[in-house]
Image (cartoon, grey):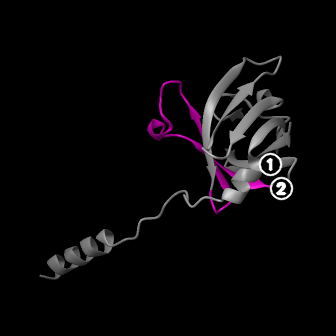
Amino acid sequence: MKKIILIVLVIFAVGCKSKEKVVGTKLDRSTEIAIKGNWVLSSVNYGGSDYIKVTSFNVADSKCFEGSEWSFVANNNKGQMALNSANCTNYSSNITWYINKDENMVLKFLTEGVKAKHTNSGYILRVVSQSKTQFQLIDKIDVAGKMTDVVYQFDKR
């Protein structure tokens, strides 16, 4: 009898556990509006950059993103990005993005012909140091068991 009561209590406790969202979806419209427009990713910096290579967004070496052009459209949360570095393979993609109230940008690279709602993977980056002419996105990566910031510096075109 004690086992049955214990099992019922465990099932009830597990069944009533609140579900947490990984990413808040309440939008920060004022930050989104401030970021709208055309930007150049002017630099990518992280600790140990002289010794390790980081593949950004599963696309290319992080240094290939320096000089890349980004367009953020605030009214529909879409945009485009293009890598155009001389020593790297050219790459371009449509993107979808939003900024939530936690100051995180949720960014997805879209595959041609696939709608954003069918794209299951994306990136969560912290928005910092925002002004009319620049902002930074910070990603966290694991380097030998230590979390390291990758700082993407954007400048207005």
Residues in magenta, as a range: 100-128
Q: Are marks 2 and 1 in contact (CB under 8 Å)?
A: yes
Q: Is residue 43 left or right of residue 109?
A: right
Q: Mark 2, residues whose alpha carbon is within 10 Å: few (<14), some, or many (≥20)? A: few
Report x, y in % for residue 70.
74, 34
Q: Identify which amino acid the numbered label 1 is placed on.
A: Gln
Q: Identify which amino acid the numbered label 2 is placed on.
A: Ser
Q: Which mark is residue 51?
A: none
Q: Is residue 53 visible?
A: no
Tell me which residue sits at (78%, 21%) in the image.
84
Report x, y in % for residue 103.
69, 59
Report x, y in % for residue 143.
70, 44
Q: Which residue is mark 1?
A: 136
Q: Residue 81 falls in which quadrant of the image?
A: top right
- Please state, as top left, top right, bottom left or bottom right, where the N terminus lies in the image: bottom left
Q: Nearer the viewer, residue 86 or 1?
A: 86
Report x, y in % for residue 106.
61, 48
Against 48, is 129 above or below?
below
Tell me which residue sits at (66%, 55%) in the image.
104
Q: CA distance from mark 2 to mark 1?
A: 6 Å
- Mark toward the start of the polypeptide (2 vs 1): 2
Q: Which residue is mark 2?
A: 129
- Please state, as top left, top right, bottom left or bottom right, where the C terminus lies in the image: top right
